[in-house]
Image: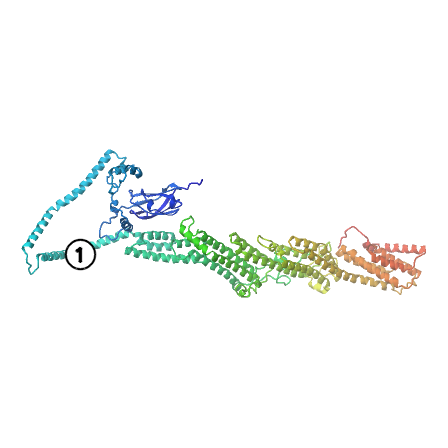
Amino acid sequence: MSRARPPPLVTGISPKEGAAWTKVTIRGENLGTGPADLIGLSICGHNCLLTAEWMSASKIVCRVGPAKDDKGEIIVTTKSGGLGTSTVSFKLLRPERIGILDQSAVWVDEMNYYDMRTDRNKGISPLSLRPSNPLGIDIDNKLPQSDIELTFPGMSGDFTSESFSATWYLIENHSGSSFEHLKMAASNLKKQATKKNEGSLAYVKGGLSTFFEAQDALAAIHQRLESDGTERVEGSMTQRLENILNRASDTADTLFQEVLGRKDKADSTRNALNVLQRFKFLFNLPLNIERNIQKGDYDVVINDYEKAKSLFGNTEVPVFKKVYAEVETRIGALRSLLLEKLLQTPSTLHDQKRYIRYLSDLHAPGDPAWQCIYAQHKWILQLMQNCRDEFISGQRVGVGALDLDGDARPLALGRLGHTASLKRGGSLRTPRPSTWRFETPQQVQFVEKLSDVVIGQLPNFWKLWISYVNGSLFSETGEKSGQVEKSKKNARQRQNDFKKMIEELTNRLVKLIRGALLPSTLPQGELSLYGGWENKTELTGAWLTQIIHTVRSCHDALSAMEIPNDLLHVIQDLLLELRVHCLMVTLLHTTEDVKRLAEKEDWVVDNEGITSLPSQFEQCMIQMLQSLKEPLEVKPGEINVLQLDQVQDQVSELSVSIMTDFVNCLEQLSTKTDGDVGASHNIAVDLSSPDRFTGIQDGVSPTSEQRLLIILSNCQYLERRTFLNLANHFEKHGFTGTEKITRVSVDAVRELDRKLFESYIERRADPIAGSLEPGIYAGYFDWRDCQMPTGVRNYLKEALVNIITVHAEVFTVSKDLVPRVISQIVESVADEMCRLMQCVSSFSKNGALQARLELGALRDAIGLYLNAESNSSFKLALDALPQLHSGADKKLLEELLNKFKSSMQLQLACFLPTSVQPVKR
């Protein structure tokens, strides 16, 4: 069951007073759902339902009937709400109180004058204007007419009607009156009849003598005319009498002309003053309109205009027409003023709606709402274009702070705002001054300001259109249904036009951003209108990320307004291209940053034998991936850029390029001369750190061999950890082809490792192996003619010391490199010893014993680092020597070996295996 509506409530009536048949406008709440719902309307007790015209739930127009009460309430009855109430009253002006009886009174009540004429044409008798209580006593207990009509068929209780029934009248109006009151009413009727009769009789009695005199005069004139049948020179008697009367009339006029003139003038003035007083609303209206317009009280002006239009819109009185024409002139000026304010920009949505309603109430020509929408559209387009023009012509170009090494474009770490320096044993760069800042590029400021313009203006523009579509521009409560329906009809006709406006705004936004960031995507003919950013700073990945965030925020704000997605598709396309562009720019800039990492090498190693360079490279890559987190993030409705085939290939190629560039960076470091290193090495070494390279003193650079070892250690760390960690980060951020990137990177670093290792072995092994032959034959030594051996000769001890030096050099950098390096050096030494032994044509007994002693001492000293090739070389060398058959020789050989090991025990200790981590100085 539906819930009943609230009862009607009348809160206003215009005008508030008037004579019978005055047209009034009733306003209130819950005045019915339609014409059929209105079942009752009474004003001052008179039923006005027949003349009622239902306009809306808050407005009814009707005419006031000839009610019995002078003042009363306005009661509305509806089917849905029942009997209503009223907070206002209406005053009924009686015709006899208005005083329109004088035939010379031209100025009459406008409403009475035309309503009475209309009523007369409709057949309403003027007798209906007589007093409604002829008996002169109070009317009480009035009975409904429907019950009396059954008892008195064909009769009427209206005393002006031809079928008047006195019984009906008494029962209807005085059924509760006492007998004494009825007797008093009868007495009143008699008095009224007596007064009427006596008044006529007294008038006749008072003029009876005059009548007789006039009769006698007329009789005498008649006799004279009959006796005097001839006409004399003066004419007939009637002519002479006429002349006399005319002269008497002229004399009277001359005597009383001035008095009568003053009386006519006074009457005219009095009538004019009465008219001015009676219709002061109309006469004061032009001035009141002007004052209220100046104060901004447009509602008051509109209400007064509607009242004046309903009262005097169709007047035929010349003075009223003249004043009303002046009112229309002022209202026309007000329409122009309101339209000018409506189209003025900037303006709030509230003011726009207010001015549109005012113009609608004033029946302004055209469609003010659509004019406002069109003006707002042009204004937003102009704002967007002005925003671009300001930055192109009027703003200064932001100048970024120079990097410490002279690079105008900061590193990726600096771009991302990370101020913490990454260091391993030392600082990467000196602290920046506290005033160091990067000024925001003009393109970034432009995109942010442009987005602010769109987000600030487009929502109100869209809301204005929605209000235009649903009709709420003209009525918030359902009033003015005619205007609402007209608005909806116009909106349906202009729907495609508005869609084109939104498309133009979004396209303009996209083209302006493309002109600033992606000019190559614009047609050549549009570059002059949207481009012009060639001299501005090149944007980095971090700034592009900020722009992507701004554009996404703009897109989200427009989506929240429920703008159809097909109108925002161009922004989605722009976002996709910006994300791809940001990805490529970040990768390219990271490539440049990686190439410059060689300049930041400080050659300070840690306990693992690596410098800060691999960590810098890893952190640079991680920061790059973190900076790409937002551009690579897939928002609702967006595409994953890493799933695009073309993007995958480019990303894979650039990622491999970054890895190989870092490997090339290491190779460049290995090939630098000592002078180059000394010139570029300007980073302070932490002297208090126990991890510093032993050979590096304050201001002293490592040797080329030391650099080779450090880079070899870094290469092993890259292959073992860095590349694997980066592969995990790539996969975590959604990059594809990580296996290929890792494989190519590992292959490149292994190739570099091979080259550097061979270079180092060549530098260290060749001098040691080359010193063996001169040492063996020093002093013209001859294997065929030599003395009994007394110990290991110095050349071998010198070779071992050189190997120990290399061991110390390698161990100081990385103990993990020691087996690999020493084994290769031992292999070279063993191969050289094998060659030298095989080149000897013959050995004496002492020579063979000396050779076995030296080969055995060498092999036993470096036995921990012998490999298959070394063992094979020693075996071939021993096979080239004669065999020892004497037990004394073997005993001597053993004693001499033990003596050698005892004498060089401290030196040879480095070749022994140990589980204790050595402490480096």
Residue 851: percent from the left, percent from the top?
89, 60
Residue 662: percent from the left, percent from the top?
69, 60
Q: Which colour scheme is used?
A: rainbow
Is 537 on the left or on the right of 85, as rendered?
Answer: right
* Viewport quadrant of the N terminus: top left
Residue to which mark 1 is pinned: 258
| Residue 796 falls in image quadrant | bottom right
In the image shown, does 904 or 378 lie closer to the viewer?
378
Q: Can residue 547 be seen in this view?
A: no
* Viewport quadrant of the C terminus: bottom right
Residue at the far top in the pictured view = 179
Is 859 on the left or on the right of 616, as rendered?
Answer: right
Residue 690: percent from the left, percent from the top?
73, 54
Query: Relative to residue 458, is residue 531 depicted above or below?
Result: below
Residue at image coords 23%, 49%: 101
Instruction: Tell me the crowding category of disc 1: few under 14, some 14 to 19, or many 20 or more residues within 10 angstroms, Cα based.
Output: few
Is 200 on the left or on the right of 778, as rendered?
Answer: left
Query: Relative to residue 3, is residue 662 depicted above or below?
Result: below
**What amino acid is found at the position of numbered circle 1 in the picture?**
Glu
In the image shown, does 346 or 200 lie closer to the viewer?
200
Residue 195: percent from the left, percent from the top?
18, 41
Residue at the far left in the pictured view = 227
In the image shown, does 886 or 432 lie closer to the viewer?
886
| Residue 91 falls in image quadrant | top left
Residue at the far front in the pictured view = 154
Is 367 on the left or on the right of 742, as rendered?
Answer: left
Secondary structure of the residue carrying tag 1 is helix
Q: Give the mark count.
A: 1
Q: Is residue 704 visible?
A: yes
Residue at image coords 33%, 52%: 308
